[in-house]
Amino acid sequence: MTGGFVFSEKPIPIESGKGAYLYGEDGTEFLDFGASYAVAALGHAHPAVTEAVQDQIGTLTYVQASYPVDARTELYQKLAALAPGNIENVWLCNSGTEANEAAMKFARSATGRSKIVATKRGFHGRTLGALAMTWKDKYKEPFEPLAGGIEFVPYDDPEALSEAVDEETAALFLEPVQGEGGIHPASASYLEHAREVTEDAGAALVFDEIQTGVGRTGDLWACEGIGVEPDILTSAKGIANGLPLGATLVKDWIAEESGDHGSTYSGGPVVCAAANATLDTIIEEDVPATAAHVGEYLQHELEVATEEHDLPVREIRGLGLMIGVQVKRGANRVLKNLALSEQVLALPAGRTVVRLLPPLIIDEDHADQFVDSFVEVLG
């Protein structure tokens, strides 16, 4: 058996990266509009993150979470301060799926209930618990049976929430903007209704901000832009700008009855140092505002180009720098042509959606470069 057998490798060996660009072994420059699924929030080889990691790894690489470490303590405090509303408790892990697994366990323990309500087209991870809350059968069928007690409802459908969330419900899991499901932002009224029905039922409202968090949608957290406060918020992807880190942020009533949970690598000093540098930079340089401005500019230019060049595009939707372009032909074909003929990298979200998750530090020139390449491929 060879290594990496679960991944389908692309024929583009990457050697290095800088800012919004990746570089192949032969020096070919690629504009990175996928950021490895929103992971490289500040772009590649960001100097502040690099320096923080080098300083920490030269002092202490790892000690388990029972021992206080400055980098970890600082991150606990920082995330508690930056979390929306009255969320003040932090549990650290290594990935988004682990953050959602923890959220699922915490909600069930705190409520004493087992039913979980999730949404169609939703994606919450690939471990057995998080996978059970994920909609697509293609991800689940090889690994069944999965965790039980999951009920799926249509996304952005308030009436469906009213029917599904009841006194047996432990938690409602929602993405404020569905990512893997095709870049579908929820309406504000839908998320407000989600808050109301979970409060009435005594259930936890969980916002999966694995992909939308740390500035991507134009606010530090997508839920802040809407003004709806969850009981649990999960984060990962860009939180440590490329190092593996996830976080489950919870209100007191969840933390007080969260049950026994742990992880050997919870909050390693090196990844915490990376996260502290990432979050400091995002706040100090007002990166969410950049994402809002450039994201709006990019969507507008894509819409203008679609009309002017009569491109085979059905819809352009998104929030900030989380944008989906639904094309009339297969997304994978478009992505392959972008990569090989235009040296531009992006992502699919289903069969017909080109997903754009560029580093949050891109500017209008980067947006123009992408639009020109997109027109060249689809024109």
Image (tube, rainbow, N blue to C red):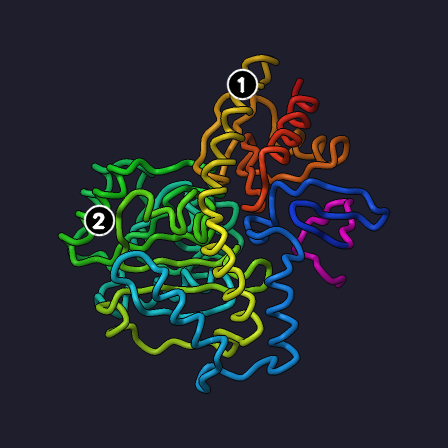
167 sits to left or right of 236 = left
> In the image, is residue 265 above or below residue 129?
below
- Vertical position of residue 375 compared to residue 7: above or below: above
User: Residue 194, how many percent across, how many down?
Assistant: 24, 46
Magenta segment, which residues? 1-15
For disc 1, the neighbor class at 10 Å (few under 14, some 14 to 19, many from 20) is few
* Residue matched to label 1: 304
The residue lying toward the viewer, choosing from 154 and 41, is: 41
Residue 372 x %, y %: 66, 25
Query: In the visual, does 256 lie left or right of 134?
Result: left
The residue shown at (53%, 29%) is: 325
Q: Amino acid at mark 1?
A: Val
Query: Residue beneath label 2, please?
Result: 195
Q: Is residue 369 magenta?
A: no
The Cα atoms of the two marked residues, 1 and 2, are separated by 37 Å
Which residue is outermost to the bottom?
67
- The quadrant in which residue 83 appears is bottom left
Residue type pointed to by label 2 = Arg
Q: Viewer-proximal residue, 71 or 91?
A: 71
Q: Nearer the viewer, residue 96 or 47?
A: 47
In the rendering, which numbered label is found on residue 51? none
Counting from the top left corner in percent of width and height, residue 374 is at 65, 26
For marks 1 and 2 on the same chain, the one whose residue lies earlier in the sequence: 2
Whether residue 299 is visible, yes or no, is yes
Q: Is residue 11 magenta?
A: yes
